[in-house]
Amino acid sequence: MSWEDTIAQAAEVVHRARYVVALTGAGLSVESGIPPFRGPGGLWTKYGEPPLNGFQRFLADPKKAWEERLNPSGPMRELWETLVRAQPNPGHYGLVELERLGVLRCTITQNVDNLHRRAGSELLAEIHGNATLVRCLSCVRRMPMEAVDLSQLPPTCPECGGLLKSDTVSFGEPIPPDVLRRCQEETARADCMLVVGTSATVYPAAGFPLDVHQRGGALVEINPYETELTPYCTVTVRAPAGEALPKIVEAVRLLRGR
Ligand code: APR
């Protein structure tokens, strides 16, 4: 099937759906200069998967963990430095356009890079948190990092006195209940999921497309490479998200006569 045919087929599936939800991963931000974690150029491919007890290590010594967060080294330093420079790319803006057309009802993102918000996404669930925010481990209140008094480490919540942590969800840390509930509710409503730039290997996020598929919903995968989800997908667009998404959105707009 030609590139044009695949784009047209993806647009048709999205146009016909009643409730479209997107699941995005690190691949969406590759064209913003942020390396993915797995696959070619991936941080974990280069340095190995991180320990799965990051949250337990935070709780064991929050002061040390905060010192490392404020002065990162190794792979995390590389990631933070690219996050600071990164700008949203046409893939992020394509999803904003789809939201503004009233087609995309929610974007569930695994990315902590804040690029969806900066691009203008409003219907957004950041399942792994947001690197620009801090979260209270007791009352789950979130606040911008720059609003937090970091003269004393670890910082505490100005509202309840609880321990504050980067909103970025660490390995071993439960997904905050508010955002997990939102993701589950949106996935349950979806009869079509756009799966963009994710290896679909980290749960619970990787389970959302399978839920949609098991209920007879359609999956549209946008990824230059095959993933474990590919066999379940209605349409697979083997292309970078920054190229494919704007073309799919334009085709959906034409189908909707806009
Ligand atoms: N456009 C679309 N997809 C791309 C692009 C691109 N330009 N470049 C790479 N990809 C794809 C890769 O083929 C891969 O399938 O993006 C995917 C990136 O996969 P991962 O690096 O595993 O990222 P992700 O799936 O988001 O990881 C999930 O793992 O380490 C944790 O918390 C971290 O949120 C992350 C989670």
Image: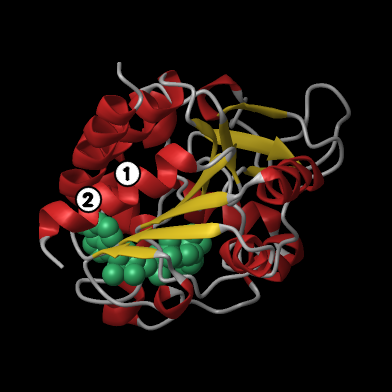
Q: Residue at x 47, y 60 (%)?
A: 219
As displayed, is residue 192 above or below residue 208? above
Q: Find disc 2 in the rendering and name its residue.
A: 7
Q: Which mark is residue 202?
A: none
Q: Amino acid at mark 2?
A: Ile
Q: Position of residue 211 (x, y in %)?
A: 67, 64
Q: Quadrant of residue 38?
A: bottom left
| Residue appearing at x 20%, y 71% in the figure | 41
User: Residue 132: image x %, image y %?
Assistant: 48, 34
Residue 228 shows up from this direction: no
Residue at 32% across, 44% down:
11
Front-lying residue, 37 or 51 = 37
Q: Residue at x 35, y 45 (%)?
A: 12
Which label sits on residue 11? 1
Q: Could you tell me how far apart the alpha carbons at marks 2 and 1 are, in whole angstroms?
A: 6 Å
Relative placement, left or right, of 5 versus 173 is left
* Applied colour scheme: secondary structure
In the rendered structure, which amino acid carries the disc numbered 1?
Ala
Q: Where is 200 relative to 132, above or below?
A: below
Image quadrant assignment for residue 182:
top right
